[in-house]
Image (tube, grey):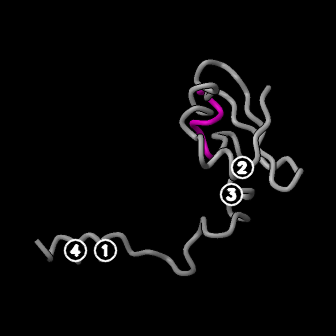
Amino acid sequence: MKTVKVAELKATLSAHLSEVRAGGTVIVYHRNTPIARLVPYQEDRDDLAFIEPSAPIAALKKIKGVRPRQRIKVARLLRDTRGDR
């Protein structure tokens, strides 16, 4: 495991990314405080899903931005969109 400060990382990013690609780990420090860890990418099935399919609808409704403020009239939306063609 290698440690590097932000300024050094910016100057030698390609070299550090090569080390990570080879399987190494790089810890990034900002003023003697660790702020990030660069590790090789591993694709997990969990990374591919944003919301669990088994999540109850009530839980999804609590997430801000999931529901629009007013109902969307799909027929009108399609008609307006197709009218532009």
Q: Position of residue 57 (x, y in %)?
A: 68, 54
User: Which tag, 4 or 2, sits closer to the chain's start?
Assistant: 2
Q: As displayed, is residue 30 above or below residue 62?
A: above
Q: Position of residue 81 (x, y in %)?
A: 22, 72
Q: Is residue 23 visible?
A: yes
17 or 10: which is nearer to us? 10
Location of the N terminus by quadrant is: top right
How far separated are the C-alphas under marks 1 and 3? 24 Å
Q: Residues within 10 Å of mark 3 (few under 14, many from 20)?
A: some
Q: Residues within 10 Å of mark 4 (few under 14, many from 20)?
A: few
How far separated are the C-alphas under marks 1 and 2? 28 Å
Question: What amino acid does circle 1 point to?
Answer: Leu
Q: Residues within 10 Å of mark 2 (few under 14, many from 20)?
A: few
Question: What amino acid does circle 2 point to?
Answer: Pro
Give the residue at mark 4.
79
Residue placed at 65% from the left, 33% from the top? 46
How far separated are the C-alphas under marks 4 and 1? 5 Å
How far separated are the C-alphas under marks 4 and 3? 29 Å
Give the residue at mark 3.
60
Question: What amino acid does circle 3 point to?
Answer: Leu
* Residue positioned most to the left: 85
Specify start and end residues of the magenta stretch as a single range.
43-50
- Under circle 2, the secondary element is loop
Give the residue at mark 2.
56
User: Which tag, 4 or 3, sits closer to the chain's start?
Assistant: 3
